[in-house]
Amino acid sequence: MLKKRREEGFNLAFLDVMACGLGAVLLILIIVDFNDDTPIPSDEIERLEQELAATQAQNQSLASSLQTQQQETSEEQANANEQASKIAQLDIQQQALQQAISTQKAVIADLEDAIAAAAPLTADDTLKLPEAGEETYLLGLIVEGKRIGILLDTSASMTDQSLIDIIKRKLSSDSQKQNGPKWQRALRIATWMLARVPKDSQVSLASYNEQTTILGNTAITRASNSENIEALATQINQLVPQNGTDLLQGIEAINRAMPSMTDLYIITDGLPSLISPSSGFSPTRSCKPFKGQQSTISGQCRLDVFNRLLRVNPLSGVKTSVILLPLEGDPQAPALYWQMANFTGGTFISPAGTWP
């Protein structure tokens, strides 16, 4: 009887244990199933979506920046290749130019040797000048024509090149004005031209500033008359550069002195600063280029005066050549005088400082 009771007690304990285990399993299943159905908060989802969108936008921006950099790199490489090609072409052109220059130098050297061998030792000039051999002839300027007029600018600006030096000489004595470097050069040019006048021609020489003076023993001098040519050279050395510049008056005066003029040579340094009211010039408040009415003149006013001169020029059909000396502050003069000379078939020269 006792044995049977112990077996029942064992069975009861085993069942309790099994029941507890089964209960624990069921509890776990209930808990797991409950957590599986628990929803994620909407705020967290929105935050994650924003972070995802920001990351995708950053990736797109980086991709676009990378594409742009790649494109710029490709363009820079293409430009570098193009520049390298241009440099190579320029190198080829430079070599060709250097070769051409060397060839031209050789040709010029041969021509100089030929000229030196063929030229006479002295020039056949009407007026004999010191150091007036063939080597002093200016290439491009030839004094020619049957009836030649020479206009020499004797205004105050002809004394020097810079404006401050011109003003100083305007306030100095006549001898200091005559010793101005540009004036001495102008005298040498005028004398050089007198020495080159063809012997079978006639010449009339006039000085002009505010007024015009016909120089010489007579208004018209035959070049074959060396005495009269020397008298002209003497008179120009006695001139004093001063006052303003009325080129139109000079042209009209020399036209009256030598009718039917064929060639005109003008020695000057800039555009005229004066014109006669009888020319028809229309003055303005800032431009009154009449004698005694304006102490200074602007570049535009000088340009207007020159343009009026060209319109009423009585020698428009005369071959006109211009020898232009340097003057500070008159940059338009070279182009305008070149047009004047070119229109009439003449020559424009702005000679180097070493000539004559």
Image (cartoon, grey):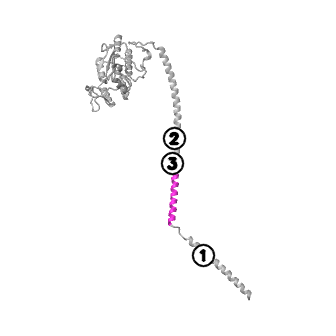
User: What amino acid type is highlighted by mark number 2?
Assistant: Asn
The answer to whether residue 344 of the structure is visible from this angle is no
The magenta-colored residue range is 42-71
201 in relation to 167, above or below: above
Residue nearest the viewer, comparing 314 with 216: 216
Residue 84: % across, % down: 53, 37
Residue 99: % across, % down: 52, 26
Q: Residues within 10 Å of mark 2 (few under 14, many from 20)?
A: few
Badge 1 marks a residue whose secondary structure is helix
Badge 2 marks a residue whose secondary structure is helix
| Marks 1/3: CA–CA distance | 62 Å
Marks 3 and 2 in Cβ contact (< 8 Å): no
User: Which residue is drawn at the image coordinates 49% and 16% (left, top)?
Assistant: 114
The overriding secondary structure of the stretch rendered in magenta is helix
Q: Which residue is mark 2?
A: 79
User: Which residue is drawn at the image coordinates 58% and 73% (left, top)?
Assistant: 31
Residue 348 colored magenta? no
Q: Residues within 10 Å of mark 1 (few under 14, many from 20)?
A: few
- Comparing labels 2 and 1, the label whose residue is closer to the camera: 1
Residue 48 colored magenta? yes
Q: Which residue is mark 1?
A: 27
Of callouts 3 and 2, the N-terminal one: 3
Residue nearest the viewer, comparing 159 with 115: 159
| Marks 2/1: CA–CA distance | 77 Å
Marks 2 and 1 in Cβ contact (< 8 Å): no
Badge 3 marks a residue whose secondary structure is helix
Q: Which residue is mark 3?
A: 68
Looking at the image, residue 293 sits to the left or right of residue 14; the answer is left
